[in-house]
Image: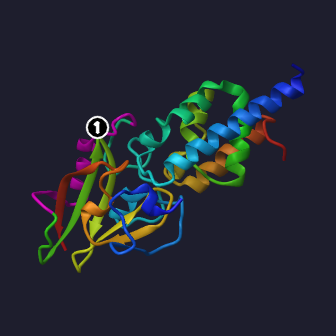
Amino acid sequence: MSSTQAAESIHERFRELRDDWKSKTRHLSNTAQIALVFSYQKIIGMGPDVVPLILSELEKEPDHWFWALEAITDENPVSESDAGDVEASARVWVQWGRDRGLLAE
Amino acid sequence: MNLTDLFPNLTGENHEVTSPRTVRYNCIAWAACNTERWWQPGVFWPVDSSRDDHGIGNVVEAFRSLGYEECDDGVREEGFEKLALYGSTMMYTHAARQLPDGKWTSKLGQLEDITHTTTEAIEGGDYGEVVQYMKRPL
């Protein structure tokens, strides 16, 4: 498999898991319940390759990707003053990705 | 997907949508009259908490800190505001706040706020059942 094919395969698997996760969690409020859905756990299991895809999702639509990002990267760039602010947290993580070249400017 | 697909007891007759969808706040925030944050233990929570504590006791403690105390039921009492806390397999899942007319208001995850006629209207699915009622003086 070429690197392009491999990237497309990762992207396709991520999209399938993302869609499954979103369809099962829109109505949930407990973040642990949201993150324990199996498709979300599988996304975390995909490891660092999936971080740019998650950041790209966050750039388009704020959502509860912070648990996965922190689990994969072992970082949390969100300040205490922004904690719980989903839109602000998304912006901080997107900037974190840009600073590391994981997202295009 | 319709709300009635997500909640087996919800019907067109026992609820009304009262807001647009938003990820800005969740049910716990809405029960506490906050529409700016997604309340989550260890992230944004009114009491010190481990981020791993998603049990019923932690959400009870959170609302105690806001002046509520445990009570026996969700029957409307003049001069009090009540909450219904939902849980499933020891994890809290939801909080609903009683309105002055005895109906209930809920924020459904990232979806809309709704008014529902009974606490049972949103039981039976992923929210489980009401496991604790709380009240505070108005």
Is A85 or B14 nearer to us in this picture?
A: B14
Q: Residue furthest top?
A: A1
* Position of B14 relative to B26 (above/below): below
* Position of B74 relative to A18 (above/below): below
A11 vs A79, left or right, is: right
Specify the subunit that label 1 lies on: B
Q: Residues within 10 Å of mark 1 (few under 14, many from 20)?
A: few
A19 vs B106, left or right, is: right
Residue under the point 56% across and 35% down: A39
The magenta stretch is B51-73
Colouring convention used in this rendered image of the protein: rainbow
* Position of A56 relative to B135 (above/below): above
Mark 1 lies on residue: B89
In the picture, which quadrant includes the C terminus of chain B? Answer: bottom left
* Position of A2 relative to B128 (above/below): above
Q: How many marks?
A: 1
